Image (spheres, helix red, strand yellow):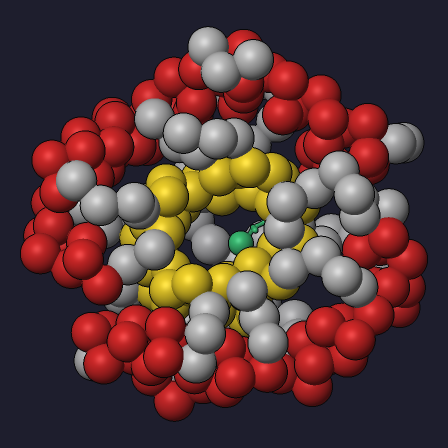
Amino acid sequence: MAVQISPSILTADFARLADVAAQVAGVADWLHVDVMDNHFVPNLTLGLPVVQSLLKATSLPLDCHLMIEDPDRWAPEYAEAGAGSVTIHAEAAKAPVRTLRAIRAAGARAGFALNPGTAVQQYEDLLGEIDMLLVMTVEPGFGGQSFLDVMLPKISKARELIGKHGGEVWLQVDGGVSAKTIERCAEAGADVFVAGNAVYGSGDPARAVQDLRDQAERATGAA
Ligand code: DX5
Ligand code: ZN
């Protein structure tokens, strides 16, 4: 289970996205792009045109996290545009299996996200359709929130279900992941770590990514 770090650009400078990507190129595994529509979450960020421009501006694969009301309509287009991973929310998708299959058919990895109030057990049957399960560790919508410790048992449960399923499903955590919390996430079984403030709120984003990776690897004994 290799540790992967996916810096979130949410709290970075949106007028300089190419530079923001370049700051972590070569050290991060992904660039996490939070798409918000002001309906599924009370915040509005960016959409497909900006993702298309960003794809031309960086060689980092994009990890698109769709916090939108109608992912069935939009998710396949992010995959077709060239995103490496497209994550839809369980609470928003009306036809998750069809949409997850469409994401894969378009050549991207299919991600499935769970809000803090959404239990993981009910989605065990979908694990075969998913390349990455995202356990939100804050209520989605904003960067810089405090990590919800109460999600740690859910991360462990998700890891257990993934192990039982036997497939290659990555387990991502997103929200409040930092030097203070990443070890607990890794110990609970997460292997893909989104970090916004901990990376772009630091003076040296590339160094922050490396430090987070070292910490997570130490915690899982993978160093
Ligand atoms: C929140 C977003 C996160 C956010 C994380 O809804 O999905 O990706 O950018 O930011 P931090 O790491 O600052 O909590
Ligand atoms: Zn996110």
| 197 displayed left or right of 180 | right
Image vertical order of residue 182 relative to residue 14, above or below: above
User: Residue 119 placed where, x, y %?
Assistant: 18, 46
| 167 displayed left or right of 67 | left
User: Residue 2 placed where, x, y %?
Assistant: 48, 30
Q: Nearer the viewer, residue 29 or 176?
A: 29
Q: Quadrant of residue 72?
A: bottom left
Q: Nearer the viewer, residue 161 or 104?
A: 104
Quadrant into which the C terminus falls: top right
Quadrant into which the N terminus falls: top left
Give the total of numbered labels: 0
Q: Quadrant of residue 73?
A: bottom left
Res. 150 visible in picture: no
User: Residue 117 placed where, x, y %?
Assistant: 26, 48
User: Residue 107 placed where, x, y %?
Assistant: 45, 74
| 50 displayed left or right of 183 | right
Residue located 22% across and 63% down the image? 129
Residue located 82% across and 35% down the image? 206
Image vertical order of residue 4 relative to residue 13, above or below: above
